Amino acid sequence: MNKDNETYLKLFWGRYNHQKRCLLSKKTKATAVSTTVSVLFGFTITFCAFALWNPFAGFSILNLKLPAIHIAKPQEQEFPLRCIKGENVTQMCPKGYYYPTSHSPTGNHSRMCPSYFKWIHEDLRAWREKGVTREMLEGARRKAHLRVVIVEGKVYVEKYRAAIQTRDVFTLWGILQLMRMYPGKLPDLEFMFDCDDRPVFPMEMFRGPNAAPPPLFRYCSDHWSLDIVFPDWSFWGWPEINIKPWKDVLKDIKEGSKKTKWKDRVPYAYWKGNPYVAPTRKNLMKCNVTEENDWDTRLYTQDWEQESNQGYKKSNLGDQCTHRYKIYIEGWAWSVSEKYILACDSMTLYVRPKFYDFFIRGMGPLQHYWPIRDNNKCTSLKFAVEWGNNHTDKAQAIGEAASKFIQEDLDMDYVYDYMFHLLNEYAKLLRFKPTIPPGAVEICPETMACSVNGTQRRFMEESMVKFPSDSNPCTIPPRFDPITLKEILEKNSNSTRQVEIWEDEYWENKGQ
């Protein structure tokens, strides 16, 4: 493991150190029978007449009421793991593969993807004219952890260096689940993936007619970089800190939010995390309540090593919707905590970020969160809480809008749809034929999950797609026209600026 990963882990651990009812019976009606029927029909009538007259039958067909027959909708056939049992066994991808190799949905319903899918087009803008050449792809290798190749519906991986914890493992696991969600639907493609935090390819380094911008996928980017954002590993679980797969966490947070009504919650701003991963977080801790100052915040240090030793009893995300306000602040880069904080219907106090992930650009200040200055956190947080407590209906509405967005537009179906459309649009840009490199190995659920145990195995099984989707991916919206994009950016900027004006006026009046 390289020195950067070692340093990250020291900081990470909190130290420097898813019936139809069919009524088949109807009331029988008497029918007049013509006397000119054929012999065959005559025989049938004679038989029926006997049945109607027969005193031993104990009932009359005319009065017979057959019970309603319920035909249940056939259950989807599940395709669980097929592990080879035994000690010291090398797990292999099943031959004559048992999982469907093509996607045949029965539902024709087509839904439009959420608005943030439009940003896929923007993230691939650098390659819109010339496409992605082999030279460009290889240019990203020096910063990549993985090369992922999809050929004829199978996934191959070439690893270049170790990733932090199991980020690479669960990212690859997520890609495999996408392939199971929509089997055979993605075209052949080849891409590079970096599992570290910060973007590494500035736009300014790849300008001009001869530029060969390298396409590199990662978890977050910024407005000055080429790096392409992709859902992070934790959507399928984060075993090192016992954070369950997203579909389960989302349920926990939804239920947890119901425990305390918004206006009955603690009227302060809450944050719990590791302050040692970045200076901006250390600076945040200065805003904690002291004997001299109360900035209306309640800030707590999360020591993951200690929490691990105590069985993660105090880090259940479903139990952290107890305050009216929750603070989101970046760490070394964007933080995984973002989606968990926004999912809770407390109003999110969003410290001005430097980075973005794949969904946050679909959310906006004063609609889904309250913007906080990065350079004057304490006074900014104090004003936000004061404003919220004096405008409780508005503050509650902002929190609920964010929670609704996360619960509805960021469920796992949409996460898979985003992955599908991003990779599909990227594949359209390739100007070369994807090939399996000599050092690549085929991966499948069996090779990844069968040989591991404990929390990692449990999270893989819990997040595993067990049968193909019965519908097609949502319909990706067209790319932004320049005017609309400019209006969106200006609206966000103006909303943030409006909050800053209110804040300045608040403190000016306080000083009088």
Image: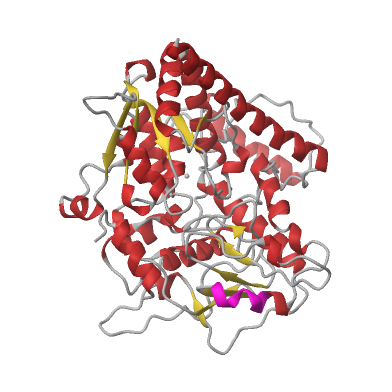
Q: Is residue 140 magenta?
A: yes
Q: Main secondary structure of the magenta part?
A: helix
The percent coordinates of residue 479 (x first, y second) are 77, 47
The percent coordinates of residue 200 (x first, y second) are 57, 64
What residue lies at 57% left-to-right and 53% top-to-bottom?
416
17 over 135 or under it: above or below = above
> Would you identify the image quadrant in which residue 17 lies?
bottom left
* Residue at far front of view: 512
| Residue bounds of the magenta highlight | 137-143
Q: Quadrant of the N terminus?
A: bottom left
Q: Is residue 274 visible?
A: no
257 over 236 or under it: above or below = above
> Would you identify the image quadrant in which residue 293 lies?
top left
> Would you identify the image quadrant in which residue 288 lies?
top left
Q: Is residue 425 magenta?
A: no
What residue lies at 61% left-to-right and 28% top-to-bottom?
497
Nearer-the-camera pick, 314 or 390: 390
